[in-house]
Image (cartoon, rainbow, N blue to C red):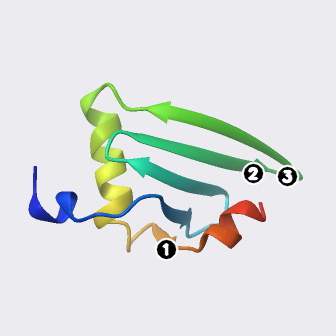
């Protein structure tokens, strides 16, 4: 585990740059996603058990600048 992983505070919040998905990252292996489709929103809880899911969470935490942005808890809850 990388030292940046050990110092990460949770939850963390992200939003895709296109504004269609919002993420509440609960840990290095767990997150919630709210997808917006038209006027509807769908919430999904994911516990990462496979390597690609874990890489996705790592990217949301540390390599997100090209596809997402950091948001506040208030912005996440307003969806």
**Left or right: 38 in relation to 72:** right
- Which circle's residue, 3 or 1, is located before the other in the chain? 3
> x%, y% of residue 31?
48, 44
Q: Which quadrant of the figure has residue 18? A: bottom right
- Which circle's residue, 2 or 1, is located before the other in the chain? 2
- Give the residue number, with chain letter if any, for mark 3: 38
Residue with the most extreme right position: 39
Question: Tags 3 and 2 in contact by the CB under 8 Å rule?
Answer: yes
**SS of the residue under disc 3:** loop
Residue in the image at 45% along x and 49% along y = 26
Residue in the image at 59% along x and 46% along y = 33
Rendered view: 9 above or below 27: below
- Give the residue number, with chain letter if any, for mark 2: 36
**SS of the residue under disc 1:** strand
Q: Which quadrant of the figure has residue 66? A: bottom left
How far is the residue under mark 2 from the one under mark 1?
17 Å
> x%, y% of residue 24?
54, 54
């Amino acid at each position: 585990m990388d030292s940046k992983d050990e110092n990460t505070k949770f939850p963390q919040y992200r939003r895709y740059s296109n504004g269609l998905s919002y993420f509440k990252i609960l840990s290095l292996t767990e997150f919630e996603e709210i997808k917006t489709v038209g006027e509807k929103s769908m919430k999904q809880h994911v516990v990462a058990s496979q390597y690609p899911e874990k890489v996705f969470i790592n990217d949301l935490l540390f390599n997100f600048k090209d596809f997402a942005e950091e948001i506040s808890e208030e912005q996440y809850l307003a969806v």
